[in-house]
């Protein structure tokens, strides 16, 4: 038993998916998936490649419209709301394929994210960068994710792992209540993964974390709830131990990964 076993995800449902589907032509990337995420949860979504995990995140963040079904945030139907409105409601995402501004500096990437934050003001980057409080906030976020140096380097010069850390800083800059992380440890060294895991574990309960991750050691260290998807369908959601013990999960993973540690 670990310190993650206390009832962290015991709050109200911050996110509810009601039979959401996403079709690409006749192909059902998501097929009537229903899922509840409670406020404060550290919930992981696992499943083989092509299971529909990234597509599901697209429906939650708003980058991808649902073909059918409903997405509710705090009980409010946001199915048709565009991305920026959902960001305003506290949804932040990092993507499987990076969306950093590679020619801008590490610091500027975080400042740009702070600028879009409600109350961040409408001034340009120079104006906001000149505000000592905002600048200090940006540096603090970079420290928090483990990028205490290289703030002036273009994001393009960062290692793969460092870019993922910067993406987390950019997501946190919008002050999210629901943080979506799509394979944040992909391409990270074991040391970088350990640091990221510690950072996510240390986030306050006010930040609910929904994480897609292939690194099952990270999943089982961090998550209080695990959802398994397979071929566009929801297979099961349960406590980590239940999921590990499930025969259905074992068979979905057969030949792709082991659900054990
Ligand atoms: P995962 O993230 O679990 O690996 P994805 O959500 O990326 O899976 O993809 C689920 C399925 O949907 C895959 O078979 C993928 O090829 C398909 N898919 C995803 N995006 C598109 C798209 N834009 N057009 C057609 N098929 C897509
Ligand atoms: Mg994916």
Image: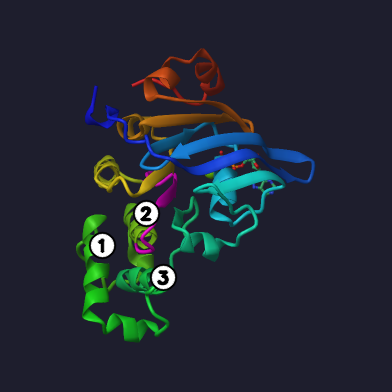
Labels 1 and 3 touching (C-beta < 8 A): no
In this rendering, does residue 186 appear at all?
no
Which of the two marks, 1 or 3, is nearer to us in this view?
Answer: 3
Residue 258, position as x, y percentages in the image: 44, 22
Q: Nearer the viewer, mark 2 or mark 1?
A: 1
Closer mark to the observer between disc 2 and disc 3: 3
Q: Which mark is residue 251?
A: none
Q: Determine whether the beta carbon of the residue marked 1 sits less than 8 angstroms from the nearest atom of ligand 2.
A: no
Residue at the spot 21% in from the left edge and 60% down from the top edge: 143
Residue located farthest toward the right when viewing the structure as drawn: 26
Residue at label 3?
A: 118
Q: Do we see residue 172 in this rendering?
A: yes
Q: Is residue 59 left or right of residue 99?
A: right
Q: Quadrant of the N terminus?
A: top left
Is residue 42 within the magenta segment? Answer: no
Query: Toward which corner of the image does residue 85 lie, by quadrant?
Result: bottom right
Binning the other alpha carbons within 10 Å of mark 1 as few (below 14), some (14 to 19) or many (20 upward) gives many
Quadrant for residue 62, please give it: bottom right
Query: Badge 2, how many Cα within 10 Å: few under 14, some, many 20+?
Result: many
Q: Which residues are magenta?
A: 173-187
Query: Mark 3 Cα within 10 Å, few/some/many (few <14, many 20+)?
Result: some
Q: Disc 2 beta carbon < 8 A from ligand 2?
A: no
| Residue 68 placement (x, y as % from top left) | 71, 44
Q: Which residue is mark 2?
A: 164
> Which residue bears the numbered disc 1?
142
- Residue 103: x and y in percent read 41, 74
| In the rendered image, the vertical position of residue 188 relative to residue 150, given as above or below | above
The CA distance from mark 2 to mark 3 is 24 Å
Relative side of 73 to 214, left or right: right
Report how far apart the C-alphas of labels 2 and 1 lie in the structure: 12 Å
Instruction: For marks 1 and 3, give the CA distance.
Output: 20 Å
Whether label 2 touches label 1, CB < 8 Å: no
């Amino acid at each position: 038993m670990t310190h993650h076993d206390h009832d962290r995800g015991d709050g109200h449902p911050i996110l509810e998916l009601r039979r959401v589907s996403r079709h690409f032509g006749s192909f059902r990337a998501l097929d009537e998936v229903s899922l509840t995420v409670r406020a404060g949860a550290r919930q992981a979504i696992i499943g083989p490649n092509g299971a529909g995990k990234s597509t599901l995140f697209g429906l939650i963040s708003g980058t991808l419209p649902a073909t059918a079904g409903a997405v509710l945030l705090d009980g409010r139907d946001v199915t048709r709301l565009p991305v920026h409105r959902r960001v305003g409601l506290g949804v932040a995402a990092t993507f499987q394929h990076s969306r950093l501004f590679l020619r801008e500096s590490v610091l500027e990437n975080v400042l740009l994210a702070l600028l879009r934050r409600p109350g961040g003001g409408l001034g340009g980057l120079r104006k906001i960068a000149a505000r000592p409080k905002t600048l200090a906030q940006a540096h603090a976020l970079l420290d928090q994710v483990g990028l205490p140096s290289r703030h002036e380097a273009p994001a393009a010069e960062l290692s793969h792992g460092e870019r993922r850390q910067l993406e987390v800083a950019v997501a946190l800059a919008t002050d999210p209540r629901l943080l979506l992380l799509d394979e944040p440890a992909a391409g990270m060294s074991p040391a970088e993964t350990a640091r990221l895991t510690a950072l996510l574990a240390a986030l306050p309960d006010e930040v609910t974390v929904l994480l897609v991750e292939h690194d099952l050691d990270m999943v089982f260290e961090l998550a209080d709830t695990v959802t398994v998807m397979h071929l566009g369908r929801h297979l099961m959601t349960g406590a980590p131990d239940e999921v590990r013990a499930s025969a259905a999960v074992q068979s979905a993973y057969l030949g792709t990964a082991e659900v054990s540690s």
